[in-house]
Amino acid sequence: MFSDDGILKDGLYESFDDFRQRILNLSKYRPSQLRKGQYIYSYCAGKYTEYVKHLYDNVGDDVDCFYKDENIDKFLKFIYDSIIYDKFINKEI
């Protein structure tokens, strides 16, 4: 069972590969007018709002996948790492 952040499963944090694959699988069912990067960005902005906002405010276009599908893996890695950092080290963003 996943926690609110979508990472915690049965008391363990899912790996980045599992996190990535779960979101990529969701993108298979996106509306046809959205590119994969647009869908993934929008999905994450709704589910992981504070981390996407942090990316937007502090990191910039190098990781943003809304306009560049080739940034999907970097974007998902940033979101995943931010959640893990927040849960174990920082406790808040």
Image (tube, rainbow, N blue to C red):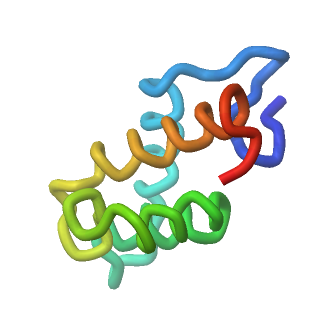
The part of the image, by quadrant, that contains residue 61 is bottom left
Image height of 90 relative to 12, above or below: below
Q: Which residue lies at the image location 64% right of the left edge and 70% below the top edge?
A: 46
- In this rendering, the count of numbered labels is 0
Q: Which residue lies at the image location 35% right of the left edge and 52% below the top edge?
A: 75
The part of the image, by quadrant, that contains residue 38 is bottom left
Q: Which residue lies at the image location 63% right of the left edge and 67% below the top edge?
A: 49
Image height of 68 relative to 6, above or below: below
- In x, y percent, where is residue 65? 29, 64
- In x, y percent, where is residue 19? 52, 34
The part of the image, by quadrant, that contains residue 56 is bottom left
Image height of 8 relative to 73, above or below: above
- In x, y percent, where is residue 36? 32, 63
Q: Quadrant of the N terminus?
A: top right
Image height of 36 relative to 92, above or below: below
37 or 34: nearer the viewer: 37
79 or 85: nearer the viewer: 85
Horizontally, residue 34 falls left or right of residue 10, namely: left
Q: Residue furthest bottom?
A: 33
50 or 65: nearer the viewer: 50
- In x, y percent, where is residue 7? 68, 34
